[in-house]
Image (cartoon, helix red, strand yellow):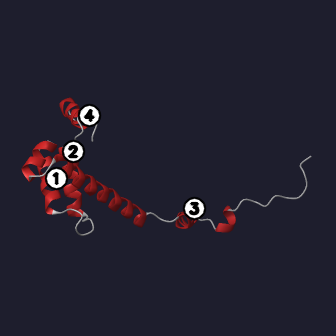
């Protein structure tokens, strides 16, 4: 949820969550739909029911209104969207891991861009004896 939302929307979100329901902003629903079109999740992650719910949230409907429109309970809707959000987070984490270099790759990249060699960046071996 964005801090930039109007105060009335923030109050509504707090009221919904405090009442045991959940809140999804139109911005978040729109972002998920747009992102899923650009970078599809694994097959089956966004079904017709979830997509319809996200479209309704994007139009500004509340959780109870979306559940009534779909003919399901708000609890079931919350479970469906909770699973969907978990899938979105997992897919984002997989993309980050896939695109993120390993520690060794980062070290080699640093050495390559700094013009160094692994031997130049090792700490010197201590010399015998104590300092006087």
Sooner in the amino-acid sequence: mark 3 or mark 2:
2
**How far apart in space, not on screen, are marks 3 and 4 (Cα)?**
54 Å
Mark 4 vs mark 2: which is more N-terminal?
A: 4
Mark 3 or 4, closer to the camera: 4
Q: Earlier in the sequence, mark 1 or mark 4?
A: 4
Dot 3 alpha-carbon crowd within 10 angstroms: few under 14, some 14 to 19, many 20 or more: few
Q: Which residue is mark 4?
A: 18
Looking at the rendered image, the disc whose residue lies closer to the viewer, 1 or 3, is 1
Label 4 – label 2 distance at C-alpha: 14 Å
Mark 1 vs mark 4: in front: 4
Q: Secondary structure at mark 4?
A: helix
Disc 1/disc 4 C-alpha distance (Å): 22 Å
- From the top left corner, tell me how far across and down residue 99 is, in percent: 41, 65
| Of labels 4 and 2, the one closer to you | 4
- Determine whether the residue tagged by mark 1 lies in a helix, strand or loop: helix
Residue where numbered disc 3 is placed: 114
Q: Which residue is mark 1?
A: 54
Whether residue 59 is visible here, answered yes or no, is no
Q: Secondary structure at mark 2?
A: loop
Residue assigned mark 2? 24
């Amino acid at each position: 949820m964005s801090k930039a939302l109007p105060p009335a929307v923030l109050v509504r979100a707090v009221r919904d969550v405090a009442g045991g329901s959940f809140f999804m902003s139109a911005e978040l629903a729109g972002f998920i739909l747009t992102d899923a079109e650009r970078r599809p999740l694994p097959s089956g992650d966004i079904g017709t029911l979830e997509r319809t719910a996200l479209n309704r949230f994007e139009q500004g409907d509340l959780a109870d209104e979306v559940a009534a429109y779909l003919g399901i309970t708000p609890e079931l809707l919350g479970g469906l969207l909770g699973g969907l959000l978990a899938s979105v987070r997992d897919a984002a984490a997989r993309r980050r891991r896939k695109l993120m270099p390993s520690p060794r790759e980062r070290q080699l990249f640093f050495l390559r861009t700094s013009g160094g060699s692994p031997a130049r960046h090792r700490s010197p071996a201590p010399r015998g004896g104590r300092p006087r």
